[in-house]
Image (cartoon, rainbow, N blue to C red):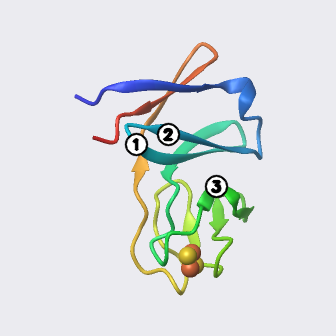
Amino acid sequence: MSEFIKVATLDEIPPGKSKLVEVEDVQIALFNLNGEIYAIENVCTHDGGPLVEGSVVDGHVVVCPRHGARFDIRTGAALSFPAFEPTNTYQVRIEGNDVLVESPI
Ligand code: FES
């Protein structure tokens, strides 16, 4: 069973916003999509671009700020060139006002 670690509070990530956190030396980008929090590794699989700095389009797609690859924030799937591999995603649990993410290791 995964261990969940508190990484933020809900009021730090209002709808439409993102936040970078670090868990076990892994950088994780949290996104609030319409009230749902999602966690993906903050690493574009093309060349390591910081996905937390990307714009969110179509409600659930982040555009890498480096060369424009697109990822589905909900699944980590790479949606467009120049990225082909998905980025990691992590389960999120909300407890009261706390945001917990599954341990990446
Ligand atoms: S590093 Fe993300 S598209 Fe190149």
Q: Which residue is mark 1?
A: 25
Q: Are marks 2 and 1 in contact (CB under 8 Å)?
A: yes
Answer few, some or many: residues within 10 Å of disc 1's Cα (few below 14, many 20 plus, some between 14 and 19): few
Please tell me whether mark 3 sits on a helix, a strand or a loop.
helix
Q: In the image, is the residue at mark 2 within 8 Å of ligand 1 by its beta carbon?
A: no
Q: Are marks 1 and 3 in contact (CB under 8 Å)?
A: no
- 23 displayed left or right of 66: left
- Per the model, the C-alpha gap separating discs 2 and 1 is 6 Å
Q: Residue at left 64%, top 16%?
A: 97
Q: Which residue is mark 3?
A: 52
Q: Residue at left 37%, top 37%?
A: 24
Q: Position of residue 36 (x, y in %)?
A: 63, 38
Q: Quadrant of residue 30?
A: top right
Please tell me whether mark 1 sits on a helix, a strand or a loop.
loop
Q: Which mark is residue 22?
A: 2
Q: Residue furthest top?
A: 96
Q: Residue at left 43%, top 81%?
A: 84
Q: Residue furthest front?
A: 25
What amino acid does circle 3 point to?
Val
Q: Position of residue 75 (x, y in %)?
A: 46, 57
Where's the N terminus, which quadrant? top left
- Per the model, the C-alpha gap separating discs 1 and 3 is 16 Å
Please tell me whether mark 2 sits on a helix, a strand or a loop.
strand
Where's the C terminus, which quadrant? top left
What amino acid does circle 1 point to?
Asp
Does residue 61 sit above or below 6 in this rendering?
Answer: below
Answer few, some or many: residues within 10 Å of disc 2's Cα (few below 14, many 20 plus, some between 14 and 19): few
Classify the position of ligand 1 by quadrant: top left, top right, bottom left or bottom right: bottom right
